[in-house]
Each structure stands twice: as C-alpha cells, then as structure tokens.
Image (cartoon, grey):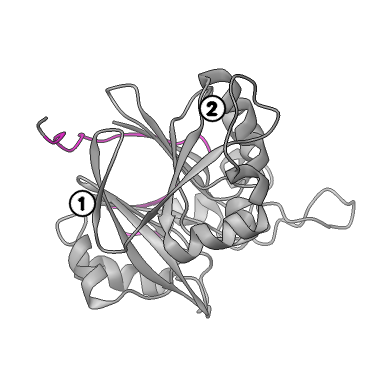
Amino acid sequence: MKITVLGCGGSAGVPMLGGADGRGQWGLCDPAEKRNIRSRASIIFQMDNGHSILVDTTPDLRSQLLANGVSAFQSIIYTHAHADHIGGIDDVRGINRLIGQPIQAYGAHDVLAEIQQRFAYVFKPWTPPEFFRAVLEAVPVSMGQQVSIGGYPFHLFEQEHGRILSTGIRCGAFAYSTDVVAFSDSSMALLQGVDTWMVDCFQRAPHSAHAWLEKVLEWREYIRPRRMILTHMGADMDWRWLQENLPQGVEAAYDGMVLEIPEPAQPSA
C-alpha cells in the first residue's frame, strides 16, 4: 500500500500567521528549507485494490489533494474533532462528485457525534444523482476493535490528547498516532510489533496535549519500530536539524512524503 503524507504540521501550520512582513512566523525553522513548509496533519492510504482511505479532513484539504494528485477516496477515518482535523470537510463534495457516491466516515462514537453536530448537513440522506453538498455516511467504531475498510483490517485505538481522547490507527505493519501525549496499556499492546510508526512530535519541550521529542524517543525504546517518522510538528522543529540530530531509524516527515508499506492480508471471502 502507498501512504502519502498530505500534511505534517500542527494546528497553526508552518509558517504560522504573522511575522514582521506578514509572511509568516517560522520559529526555529529555516524558511529556505521547503520541507519546513507544513500544512495541517493528514495522510492517505492508497490500497492495491484501488480503495483509498483519507485520515482527517484538514482546513488545507483542497490544496493537499491537488498538490499530491489525489482525485478519489472512498473512506475517511477521523482521529478527533478538533478544527485542524475536520475543518475542510466541505471540500469532500468535490470527491463525491468525482466518484459519484457518498463517502464512509469512520471514527469513535463521540467523535462522529460531535462532527455530525457541527456539520449536520453533511450527514443528511443523499438524493441522487447530484452533489450540491458534501455527503458522508457515519460508521461508528468501538475503540480497540478491528474494522474492515475497503476490504482491509484496520485497528482503531484510544490515545490521550490532553483533555480529550484521539484515535490511533494500525493497518498491518504501519501505525499512525497523531495528536497524542499518552497511551493506555491496551493501546501500547496494539502497537507491539509495528514496523513503521508515524507519531505526533509537536515540539522539543514538554507539552500538555502533544508528545515532545524526549517522550517520543522513550516510546521508541518500548515499542521498537524499525522506522519512526515524526509528524504534527510545530515551528521549532526544523527539518534539517532533526535529520542531523535524530537517532538512526527516526526521521521527520514532510508534506508530500510517500511510503510504500506491505499490505495486510485481506480477509478471505
């Protein structure tokens, strides 16, 4: 399966709004390094059977899809209902039109309920054939359980994200953990044996809702993935500095990064 990093920035992106000339606050990030330009965190799974699964609908969704040549997906997994992860939901309308059908939205019961409350029109029954609005069909998932999406097994698990819970995703040997500061024992158990782990690392200093560099490296010692990739990075996480200072096997993501990961076996019919 192919996994593309559509965005790897925090809720404000990099650069953040502002700056002396109004062209952005870069923090410790070098503006000359293109891999420091980060849109809001999202990935997309493109499976060998043609099914694609988007993770979150960020406020940058339209530009993310165009930049990466994505014109179709059939499913969405929502990690949580913060604005930087759901704010681009209306852009799904363009994909509805291209594929000619509603899109299934998977997530925790409370997450989908909150999204439905904020964007009720998106979840109203659809009358064919035209799409005047985005159309999603909610598929609530109990955390810690396996769910089949596009014919492939996905495990969704709880993560602590400050005052709320977010959802981690495991598909075969790959796991995605954005917006997390701690894991329960059961979630850590689901991460055992993972080969490639993409994980939240917002900044170098401790944070109340997001993992920081020292914390992430502690998790690595426990889970021992072959490859760890940092995402949801803020403006003090310069890409070049990270590449030069991270231990072997740990690297920083960048917008447009592509991973080729062995697919999990599809359940037999």
Point out residue 25 in the picture as x, y percentages from the top left corner: 76, 57
Q: What residue is shown at x 22% (from left), y 61% (from top)?
A: 191
* Type of amino acid under label 1: Arg
Q: Marks 1 and 2, how far apart in space?
A: 26 Å
**Which residue is more in the foreground, 64 or 134?**
134
- Mark nearest the camera among 1 and 2 is 2
The residues colored magenta run 246-267
Q: Residue furthest left?
A: 268
Magenta region includes residue 266: yes
Point out residue 60 in the picture as x, y percentages from the top left corner: 65, 42
When the figure is inspected, residue 33 is found, relative to residue 19, above or below; the finding is above
**Which residue is more in the foreground, 114 or 31?**
114
Reading the image, the residue beneath label 1 is 226
Q: What residue is shown at x 22% (from left), y 72% (from top)?
A: 186
Question: How many neighbours does mark 1 have within 10 angstroms: few (below 14), some (14-19), or many (20 or more)?
Answer: some
Reading the image, the residue beneath label 2 is 68
**Which residue is more in the foreground, 232 or 100?**
100
